[in-house]
Image (cartoon, rainbow, N blue to C red):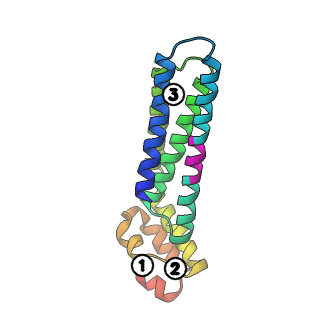
Amino acid sequence: ARRGFGELSTAATICALLILALSHWGGQGSLDSAARAVSLALLGETALLLASAFRRVWLYEAAYGFTTARLYAQVYMVVLGLVLALLAWELRERPAVQRLARRAMALGLAAVAALGCWNHEAWIARWNINRAVETGRLDPGYLVWGLSPNAVPALVDGASRLPAPLAADIT
């Protein structure tokens, strides 16, 4: 899964850089609309790969539970998808690389700020506890040792809903 994530990131980056390079150094002329259509098709295919990867991570989380790494990967994929959408929007005309870079940076900073303000570790703990109530499967080692103290209130609240053997593992 990690290798696939790296490959997806590399493919999306190469796709964006190729489109930007071709729009910058390519000549204007009769092939401009055809090149734009091919660029949009390439962006669409990359977006499909991204959506497929996002869905696979979601299925993995449904089977094994959330972790911060899996959540961060999904946030990254959402930001990358938005950046690809911005690039597609920029292809209406000749893309302005600096404007696109500023917008991509703003999206990335907004995602980091949102993760910094949101207690995502407590959300992960609650989600995994809810999953354990339904399935009886829980990774107490990750919940206790893999999350920061920010998750403790959610763990304490959730322990009362768990079966006694699982509750004992996290208290």
Observer-nearest of 134 and 78: 78
Compared to residue 109, the image places residue 32 above or below, namely above
Residue positioned 38% across, 75% down in the render: 141
Q: Amino acid at mark 3?
A: Ile
Q: Element type at marker 2?
A: loop
Name the quadrant containing residue 38. Answer: top right
Earlier in the chain: of badge 2 and badge 1, it is 2
Type of residue at label 1?
Answer: Ile
Q: Position of residue 15 (x, y in %)?
A: 49, 35
Residue at mark 3: 19
Q: Is residue 71 above or below residue 32?
A: below
Q: Alpha carbon of mark 2 to alpha carbon of mark 1: how far?
A: 13 Å
Coordinates of residue 171 in the picture (x, y in percent)? 41, 80
Task: Reply above or below: 148 against 41.
Answer: below
Q: Is residue 161 left or right of residue 7?
A: right
Q: Identify the residue under disc 1.
A: 170
Of the numbered discs 1 and 3, the one sitting upstream in the chain is: 3
Q: Quadrant of the N terminus?
A: bottom left
Which stretch did the figure color magenta? 46-52
Q: How many labels, in total? A: 3
Q: Is residue 159 magenta?
A: no
Q: Residue furthest front?
A: 31
Determine crowd level at label 3: few under 14, some 14-19, many 20+ residues with C-alpha closer than 10 A.
Answer: many
Q: Element type at marker 1?
A: helix
Q: What residue is shown with label 2?
A: 137
**Image depth: mark 1 or mark 3 in front:** 3
Q: Comparing marks 2 and 3, which lies closer to the viewer?
A: 3
- Examine the structure image and report whether residue 49 is included in the region drawn in magenta: yes
Say few, some or many: other residues with alpha carbon within 10 Å of mark 1 (under 14 / 14 to 19 / 20 or more). many
Question: Whole-Å distance between the Cαs marked 2 and 3?
Answer: 45 Å
Which label sits in the foreground, 2 or 1? 2
